[in-house]
Image (spheres, grey):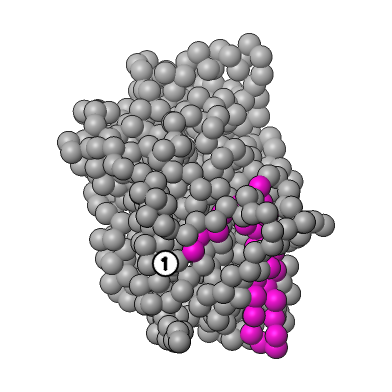
Amino acid sequence: MVDNTTNSTAPVAGAHVSTDPFRRGLAAGWKVIDASKQAADLTLECDVCIVGSGAGGGVTAEILSGAGLRVVIVEEGPLRTSSDFRMLESQAYPDLYQESAARKTADKSINILQGRCVGGGTTVNWTSSFRTPETTLAHWARVHKLHGFSSSELRPWFERMEARLSIAPWPVPPNQNNAALARGAAKLGIPSAMIRRNVRGCANLGYCGVGCPTNAKQSMLVTTIPATLERGGILLTRTRADRLRFFEDRVEALECSIAAGGSPDATRRVRIRARAFVAAAGAIGTPGLLLRSDVPDPHALIGKRTFLHPTVVSAAIMPHRIDGFAGAPQTVYSDHYLDTLPPGGPIGFKLEAPPVHPILAAITLPGHGPDHASLMREFANLHVQIALLRDGFHPESPGGTVRLRDDGSPLLDYPLTPYVWDGVRRAFRTMAELQFAAGAASVMPIHGKGTAFATFARARAGIDAFALAPLTTPVVSAHVMGGCPMGSEERTSVTDPTGRVHRTANVYVVDGSLFPTSIGANPQLTIYAIAARLAEGIASTMRPATTS
């Protein structure tokens, strides 16, 4: 159990504002090219071209460059660093997120938060670090025939990345928003625990999602990408990977366009020739790239079985200040409703307490005009819980499909089945009960026009009567997985267990799109560990090119 009797948002001892590594590195000659500022077409050659600079791409780049290979990283978003981060949502969302943090599924019913900047999601996530649940890995082996990825086989890779990225228990008492989750769980006899975080010298500011101004978050932005550039790697920014060009079973080049604004600039092009190509653009971007490139796909699997953790929200007004914007954003969780609902049964869910920032709260809370303003006046007393549903473990939770729009951009279709809606209803009940147990004056599950309940009995009756439906019941997600799953059998997988795409000689996938299902936990550490393992495998098959 977590001790929730104290709360602190004071800086951690030893916290400091470190020097921006990019300012120092650029002055020393790092090769960073903003494609939007190029006056002419650009052609580059390297050993390995990596599309995406997030968890998978960043780890892969560091390991391959450390093996002496010439690496080019292609990033669609801009380079923004601690020198730019001002703890302002209005600045961060358009700068650092896909579609200004408004990316949605095809029917607009699910909002997806994804990074679009150097460092990808690792630059804007909330630092929550979990090893892949053993039940998930066992399910992958049993149902999806993915062997070699048990918890014991991945342990050395977890340990390696935890050491590299300073992933460790968080020693500071939770802020009031997280403490309320732990307090309610304790009162109901439900286990909860503290979340490990990938930080070093953290000042406990609470604004991880808009870019860390002190470089405490050990994202790819301040760890693996600087290490790659220090070894002579090249980083291309504002560069959209359009198409892999094949000759027989090998890709010879990646063709890119300029991504300065919302639409690519078709008048200038970037072309990268390489011996191997790694798709690490995330579980919407990677399937999109493979589909645009007509990668061999005899069983039409690319983009299928793409998974989210469909997430629903419950808000509560507490009788005292919560200030959910202050202090480490996400430090307490409960897996009780995953551990007691094994894969194959009713859908399980993970409970967490997200940060509560003004814009994020304003676009999440229901209502308009005076009703919405009334809710926002209670902002300081607002406590929020989320339930992340573990999708993909049951025949009635097949996930979604990435397809291409007419302009070639990727779009995720994600129908929610009655099986998932059953989990949403149970999650709303659970969160309401926990919030009342924690002392809430009222609880409002985020659904419909927004109805607040003064007791759990009324909340339960109201939730049981909800007509849950797309758009009526807001669903969000910050975790996208699957769409290019690993496996030993071509008829059920897009890549083999090394990450190499079937029927290609030199194309690899190294990101969360490799997962056969969602994992039931925040995925960054799983991606780090699997990426490290696969990148070492790629390095072992490639010798650095000799120079005359």
- Under circle 1, the secondary element is loop
Magenta segment range?
Answer: 234-260
**Which of the image's four quarters has the N terminus?**
top left
x, y percent for residue 84: 46, 37
Looking at the image, which is closer to me, 255 or 380?
Answer: 255
- Few, some or many C-alpha atoms within 10 Å of disc 1 (few <14, some 14-19, many ≥20)? some
Mark 1: which amino acid? Gly
x, y percent for residue 176: 32, 27
Relative to 418, does residue 17 appear above or below in the rendering?
above
Residue 242 colored magenta? yes
Residue positioned 41% across, 73% down in the render: 64
**Which of the image's four quarters has the C terminus?**
bottom left
Residue 385 colored magenta? no
Which quadrant of the figure has residue 67? Answer: bottom left
Which quadrant of the figure has residue 181? Answer: top left
Instruction: Determine the residue located farthest toward the left in the rendered image.
Output: 13
Residue positioned 61% across, 64% down in the render: 286
Please state if 473 lies on the left or on the right of 231 as rendered: right
Instruction: Determine the residue located farthest toward the right in the rendered image.
Output: 406
What residue is disc 1 on?
A: 232
Relative to 381, does residue 292 appear above or below in the rendering?
below
Looking at the image, which is closer to me, 447 or 81?
Answer: 81
